[in-house]
């Protein structure tokens, strides 16, 4: 049996006050009948509107999740022929217009950024990744991966200073699982820029890591070069 709250017990113990309150309420309704009726109409209209908006947004959120899943399955699913980039871009842009304001749009933006990156459409990928960084700033691990992708985009564009900045920010992420990867790429960038001392410093950092580095052989090769 559910317990009766203290406030409810108090109400049951003091029926007279309740009766007085109700009596005064009835008298007030009779005195201001028209005003109360109008107020009730406005109040319930507001409730209905709010309920409608809540239902609409809830329904929109569910539909957005389903629609995004459909796009992903059509373009990224196992055994699914890869759609032309133009067709994928059209699907995502229509999705953004239809489901704006939902959380699914943020995930869709990140997926579309990745596809733009894969297609070599770097100038379109960059603002999408920048926006994703803001959207997922509360997720440290995801933000680190997004920043890593940005670094690779700038590296592909041969904008080495910007790439270096993002790789360095990846290094600063606490507990970063991609620290080794960032160090290696920074070493390569320093090598391209003719900064051999900095390159060697980055490679020494890789060698000092507790676990054996998957980049060990590449580091040796780069160091000999």
Image: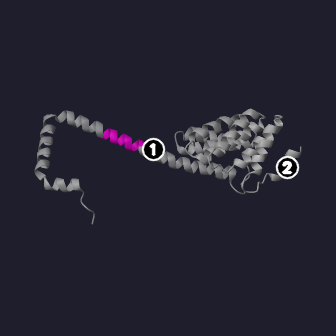
Q: Between 202 and 139, which is closer to the camera in this rendering?
A: 202
Report whether 75 appears left or right of 61. right
Q: Position of residue 115 (x, y in %)?
A: 70, 44
Q: Secondary structure at mark 2?
A: helix
In the rendered view, how is the structure colored? one colour
Magenta extent: 44-53
Determine if the magenta segment contains residue 222.
Answer: no
**Front disc: 1 or 2:** 2
Q: Image quadrant for the N terminus?
A: bottom left
The answer to whether any part of residue 86 appears in the image is no
Rendered residue at 70%/41% (across/down): 167
In the foreground, 182 or 105: 182
**Residue where numbered disc 1 is placed:** 56
**Badge 2: how crowded within 10 Å, few (<14), some, or many (20+)?**
few
Q: Main secondary structure of the magenta part?
A: helix
Distance between the alpha carbons at the discs numbered 1 and 2 = 60 Å
Extreme residue toward the bottom, this view: 1
* Residue linked to disc 2: 220
Return the mark for residue 195: none
């Amino acid at each position: 049996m559910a317990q009766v709250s203290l406030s409810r017990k108090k109400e049951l113990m003091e029926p007279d006050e309740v009766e007085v309150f109700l009596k005064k309420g009835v008298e007030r309704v009779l005195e201001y009948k028209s005003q109360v009726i109008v107020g009730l109409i406005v109040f319930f209209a507001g409730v209905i509107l709010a309920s409608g908006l809540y239902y609409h947004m809830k329904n929109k959120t569910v539909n957005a999740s389903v629609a995004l899943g459909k796009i992903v399955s059509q373009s990224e699913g196992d055994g699914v022929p890869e759609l032309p980039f133009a067709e994928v871009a059209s699907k995502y842009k229509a999705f953004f217009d239809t489901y704006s304001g939902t959380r699914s749009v943020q995930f869709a933006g990140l997926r579309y950024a990745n596809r733009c990156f894969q297609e070599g459409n770097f100038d379109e990928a960059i603002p999408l990744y920048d926006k994703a960084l803001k959207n997922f700033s509360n997720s440290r691990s995801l933000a680190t991966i997004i920043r890593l992708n940005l670094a690779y985009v700038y590296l592909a564009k041969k904008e080495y200073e910007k790439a270096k900045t993002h790789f360095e920010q990846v290094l600063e992420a606490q507990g970063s699982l991609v620290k080794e990867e960032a160090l290696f790429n920074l070493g390569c960038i320093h090598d391209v820029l003719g900064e051999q001392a900095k390159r060697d410093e980055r490679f020494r950092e890789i060698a000092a890591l507790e676990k054996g580095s998957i980049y060990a052989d590449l580091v040796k090769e780069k160091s000999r070069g």
